[in-house]
Amino acid sequence: GENVEQHPSTLSVQEGDSAVIKCTYSDSASNYFPWYKQELGKRPQLIIDIRSNVGEKKDQRIAVTLNKTAKHFSLHITETQPEDSAVYFCAAGGPGQGGKLIFGQGTELSVKP
Amino acid sequence: EADIYQTPRYLVIGTGKKITLECSQTMGHDKMYWYQQDPGMELHLIHYSYGVNSTEKGDLSSESTVSRIRTEHFPLTLESARPSHTSQYLCASSEWGLLSSYEQYFGPGTRLTVT
């Protein structure tokens, strides 16, 4: 089955710096790669996603890149702000997983003012 | 407003009690999921359903059971609660198909404490 590894587990940056979180997946049939943000005490919410037919997607300060050959994808946050502080989860899924998402272990991002 | 709802939000209960965590969605999604999550930690899939009368166990073994009698309702039951069941339980739903967004929408969660 699919396995998703996420690194780092914790990340601390200064406000205004960039943050990068990386994930690798094992099942080459996976074709959908979302990123979720979970603030303390709240539900996970989708912030950006990418499908396997696209190499990069950007939405304002966040971007995701996908390397299908290497089976890894990354979340990039530029010009970080204190409100970006949260736990971020990557996931992989697709018809091969029957609609399920396999989540990474999570990264706790702390943005210091 | 289309959303996914969970009740109760918080539950403190004694060992041995039977509990049911409720999950309902008004999005018309076929697929629903239950995750177990300790605060800020990994999401573990414990049950999922592809539609009415369809339920499957997830990747993390759980003593809980689920049912799917109606599309919008996916309750989770623990016949005999134990302290090891203390955790947060998140319900989610999604649509899956060529034209669908694939996104899973999460409910607000139920924080369960078994004393």
Image (cartoon, rainbow, N blue to C red):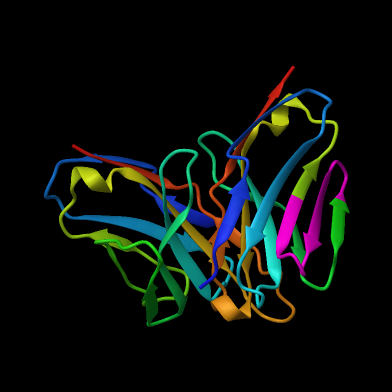
Residue A82 picture location, percent across and down: 72, 25
Q: Does the rendering let one see residue A57?
A: yes
Q: Residue at x 69, y 68 (%)?
A: A32
The residue nearer to you, when weighing B68 against A23, is A23
Q: Residue at x 86, y 59 (%)?
A: A56
Residue A55 picture location, percent across and down: 85, 64
Q: In which quadrant of the rendered image does the C terminus of chain B lie?
A: top left
Q: In which quadrant of the rendered image does the N terminus of chain B lie?
A: bottom right
Identify whether B15 is placed above or below A52: above
Identify whether B76 is placed above or below A88: below
Identify whether A95 is placed above or below A60: below
**For the stretch drawn in magenta, what is the main secondary structure?**
strand
Q: Is residue B34 left or right of residue A14?
A: left
Q: Image quadrant of residue B111?
A: top left
The residue nearer to you, when weighing B10 against A46, is A46
| In the image, farthest residue toward the front | A70
**Stretch of the chain drawn in magenta:** A59-74
Q: Is residue A67 magenta?
A: yes
Q: Residue at x 66, y 31 (%)?
A: A85
Q: Is residue A54 magenta?
A: no
Residue A91 picture location, percent across and down: 62, 59
Residue B56 picture location, percent across and down: 38, 76
Q: Is residue B103 left or right of residue B35?
A: right
Identify whether B84 is placed above or below A51: above
The residue nearer to you, when weighing B46 against B6, is B46
Q: Image quadrant of residue B11?
A: top left
